[in-house]
Image (tube, rainbow, N blue to C red):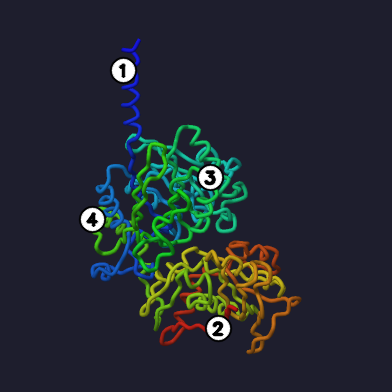
Amino acid sequence: MLNKIVPTMAALLMTSGIASADYSLTVLHTNDFHARFEPISKYDSGCSAEDNTEGKCFGGSARMVEAVKAARARTNNSILVDGGDQFQGTLFYTYYKGKVAAEMMNKLGYDAMTVGNHEFDDGPEVLRGFMDAVDFPVLMSNADVSNEPLLAGKLAKSTVIERGGEKLGLIGLTPQDTDELASPGPNVSFSDPVAAVQGEVDALTAQGINKIIVLSHSGYAVDQRVAAETTGVDVIVGGHSNTLLSNTNERAKGAYPTMVNDTAVVQAYAYGKFLGELNVTFDDNGDIKSATGEPIVIDAGVPEDAATKSRIAELAGPLQEIRERVVAKSGTEIRGDREVCRVEECEMGNLIADAMLARVKDQGIQIAIQNSGGIRASMDAGDVTMGEVLSVLPFQNTLSTFEVSGQTIIDALENGVSQVEEVKGRFPQVSGLKFTWDASVAPNEGRIQDVMVMKGGAFAPIDPAATYGVVSNNYVRGGGDGYKMFRSAANVYDFGPDLADVVAEYLAAKDGGYNQFLDGRIAKK
């Protein structure tokens, strides 16, 4: 009997030794790529071939191919995942929709991605076409798609992949307010991210999965909340807020990774300027022993893959004539970066709002309101090409005119400043009016103060009971970015010219070139 017991104990000891082995994984990640398949400038817009040759450009799919190849060579186990918003942002999306994104992501060998709000910009049909074209799962846990025939049974909440002999659970997450941000249609409903993630964690854990990664297009603040209020999540790969996390970059909004309890939260800015590289070591229980890394800047020091560069040039062929047409001149840089435009008056916001109002002022329109989320890039000084304008305004929004009461305008501005702390795209850039807002007041509780409307060449207090003519874009007029109060407007016309064309023509009409300015139309107490 003793002879039988001793081998059994030895076997247990051997098994224990094997079980205690650590498991290392490199999580390579991108987010908010927004169709930047070609190199971009420091302003996140187009970068000329000459500047690229001179080493002044960043990103582009050709560099990303080489960066991912080099990162994979540094590790035994790796995955490549995306935090959403591959769609929208350049003419590549306007012309090809999701086809180029699918081709490039397949070439890079992604393992999974989550649905970003912009994946719904053209409804479930384009998203489904993209999903059919890619070689990896697209995930979204906090939505019910059972009533949408194009997505039901196709769009999973989570998935399990294997790497290095270990199973990894991957969960997708998208903004809870995607119905306000994009066009998912009436058959898709969104839910709280914490409950959705915990539900999938529990399901994966029941399958014996103890290494769980959330791919979250929900923003840095929400990611930290999910990390704090759930159990069992090891890593959150973020997106949506275009947050740079770094331990070395002075512009970083937090550490890379940001640890919340035992969860590592990462994000890598946007537009392919960085490739996130997180090195995680797990113990046998699936708990993180260490998590270290740093986003890799995709600058001129990263070579371009020749085959990918050639393919992108081929795809760009039909777009060249549109992009290269010089439409105007700018005497100065015009700032349109989100860190400014989503929290205060900005130069690009003034340009766009003024251009909108100038176009329809002779129709009795008095006020222009542009959501800052529709402003996607800055412009440098010099020649302004149509390609640059389209980088700033890529969404093919049309001018929309309508009539609402003064109170509705106040309500709209209140909505616009309700999420400043989260740097959300609903922040309003305006023309024909000016306003003051008080950050010390709770959101939607009276932050908006001293609203003045231009009347007869001078500003006068807004009359809540009066009717005003407003111009915006069709997305905002339809309730996007929380502007639901505009859905019931009177005398609506949503089918004006493309906003990009309006801005291009406004710039072209400026003799001697356009010069940016700020004039205090938005003030903060």
> Looking at the image, do the residues carrying marks 4 and 3 touch, with CB atoms under 8 Å apart?
no
Q: Mark 4 packing: few (<14 Cα in 10 Å), some, or many (20+)?
A: few
- The picture quadrant where one finds residue 152 is top right
Mark 2 — residue?
520
In terms of depth relative to the viewer, which is nearer, 516 or 329?
A: 516
The residues bearing labels 4 and 1 have C-alpha atoms spaced at a distance of 59 Å
Left or right: 66, with 449 as reference point: left
Closest to the camera, between mark 3 and mark 2, is 3
The CA span between labels 1 and 2 is 83 Å
Describe residue 457's horizontal placement relative to residue 296 as left or right: right
Of marks 4 and 1, which one's residue comes earlier in the chain? Answer: 1
Q: Position of residue 140 (x, y in %)?
A: 51, 46
Numbered marks: total: 4
The residue carrying pointer 2 sits among few (fewer than 14), some (14 to 19) or many (20 or more) residues within 10 Å by Cα, namely few
The amino acid marked with disc number 4 is Ala
The residue indicated by pointer 4 is: 306
Query: What residue type is disc 1 on?
Result: Pro
Q: Position of residue 306 (x, y in %)?
A: 23, 55
Q: Secondary structure at mark 2?
A: loop
Distance between mark 4 and mark 3 Cα atoms: 40 Å
**Precedes in sequence: disc 3 or disc 2:** 3
x 35%, y 32%: residue: 19
